[in-house]
Image (cartoon, grey):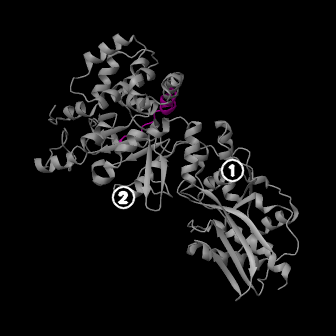
Amino acid sequence: MNHEEEDRVASCWSATHAPLGPVAVKIECALGRGFTGIVIIGNAGQVCEDGKERAKAALERLGWSAPARKILISVSPGDLKIDQSHLDLCMAVLLAQITRDTPWSIDLSQWLLAAEIGLDGQLRPVSGIIGWAAAAKAAGLQGLVVAESNLQELNCLKRVSAELGGQGVDNLQCLGFSCLDEVLNWLETGVYEPKADAVESLPLVTSATDFDDMDLSEDLRLVAMVVAAGMHSVLLRGSPGTGKSMFARRISSILPKMGVLEHFEALRTHTANQRQVDSSILSGVPPFRAPHHFTSLSALLGSHHHPGELALASGGVLFLDELPEFRRDVLEGLREPLETGEIAVSRAAGAAIWPARVLFVSAANNCPCGWFASRRRTCQCPPSRMQAYRNRLSGPLQERIDIHINMNEPADQRASLLQAPISRKDQTRTMQQYVVRARERAGQRSGFTGVLHNRDIPAAKILDTFGLELAVAANMVEAVMPTYTSARSLVRCLRVARTLADVQDRDAVWTEDLKMAWKWHCLSAARERGEILPL
């Protein structure tokens, strides 16, 4: 090995997670003295160690031969743990460069590379690609080189970032390739020609289930529109077969598309969890997540690297069916996120803050057997078991749920099942129009309230949004709301009342709106079911 080969060092950029978020890391490659082989220097895990073999095998298929020398690959900063497969492309390109006699036409020091490589040389998508884009921008790099499958979400990110007006990645160059051979050809010639079918074209995504096949009463239709318009959390109670789950799973069908900020956060969150973001998220459709009641606390809240179900549902619906069957720590873990709209996850290895601005929808039976307060069957639960079941939902958690609805039993369930399927054509579209109009009203007040959704109106400003003189609004609240109502419950009822007026296209909140909001409170709903609660 001559001195020229000894002095040759190739480098490029990739990224990894850090305590304060994704950061760019420098990958260097050099020929050294010693035994023949490839050695990775740095805090690399087994996945990265395997990546050098994937990169070597892909290069050998293109006719590359490893030199009979020691090859050093350095990852810096060396104290950051890296255990993902997105370094494969970096290692392959650097191995090819270190054995070349002529430089590339492209300055690799200005590009961040992130893709997994198959043994056949195909580039595969990786998770966290939007975080890597933010890291590239923070490092002042020119752009990213990724697998073609990741290009669509990056283009979507750039479009949303431009709408936000300064998230910093809208002018970042993003190049997508399908195989390693294409990347090496681009480095050799400096010419990038995007494929015709690689141009972004998002499919039209609609909800698979909507309200057009459900016979809704006027009260339930109003509940659905209020919940969707104000993003108010709701708990549906009732006997088996009353349509709780059916109703809950259709609420997302009347939600408008996510706002720009919600869309940006959803892209950032979902790319940290998936190699390819779903087309519905790319299109701006609010997410719908329905974890099983065996879900653990860490799966719900997430970790410092990976978002949980709460974060993945941000901007959309989080549906928890059979709510009392969830573990107590999982239920209590909902309290702060429902109040603050974010999750602060702290672990010994790092910390992260994930968005949690969800429309929380839940359903529960009235008792373990399900037939308490039913007209069709008699409840067989002993009082002790009944009380233990009710105690699974703590008072503070119930107070953080804006709307509590008791689902009515159908008069003749067998007849409804044997009849032809119900068709309420355009019912969903009509309800969504009401929701959009109500949100437009709320949006007109956003300059004053500082929020887009009524559920987030600050307590100090809520009465000022009532469209009444402050004294008149205060007297109306005093006349309707019981004196034993807690401050949290009072504020949440006032927000619901404001949304009721918006859905009915009114500037002013009426007494009937306040009465309806109180009827939907957890205490009122419990007494309607026949539960005796202390004041």
Q: In this view, does 306 lie to the left or right of 146?
A: left
Q: Is residue 452 left or right of residue 185?
A: left
Q: Is residue 117 visible?
A: no
Q: Distance between the residues labelled 2 and 1?
A: 35 Å
Give the quadrant of the C terminus.
top left
- Return the residue nearer the eye: 89 or 1: 1
Magenta residues, start to end: 418-433
Whether the magenta-drawn stretch holds residue 390 is answered as: no
Dot 2 crowding, Cα within 10 Å, few <14, some 14–19, many 20+: some
Q: Position of residue 442 (x, y in %)?
A: 49, 24
Q: Which amino acid does label 1 sit on?
A: Lys
**Splitting the image into 4 quarters, where does residue 292 fall?**
bottom left
Q: Of helix, strand and loop, which one carries label 2?
A: loop
The residue depicted at 44 percent of the width and 55 percent of the height is 302
- Can you identify the residue that label 2 sits on? 296
Q: Is residue 114 above or below residue 139?
A: below
Q: Position of residue 417 (x, y in %)?
A: 34, 43
Q: Is residue 28 visible?
A: yes
- Can you identify the residue that label 1 sits on? 137
- Return the residue nearer the eye: 412 or 189: 189
Q: Which amino acid does label 2 sit on?
A: Ser
The residue depicted at 76 percent of the width and 83 percent of the height is 66
Dot 1 crowding, Cα within 10 Å, few <14, some 14–19, many 20+: many
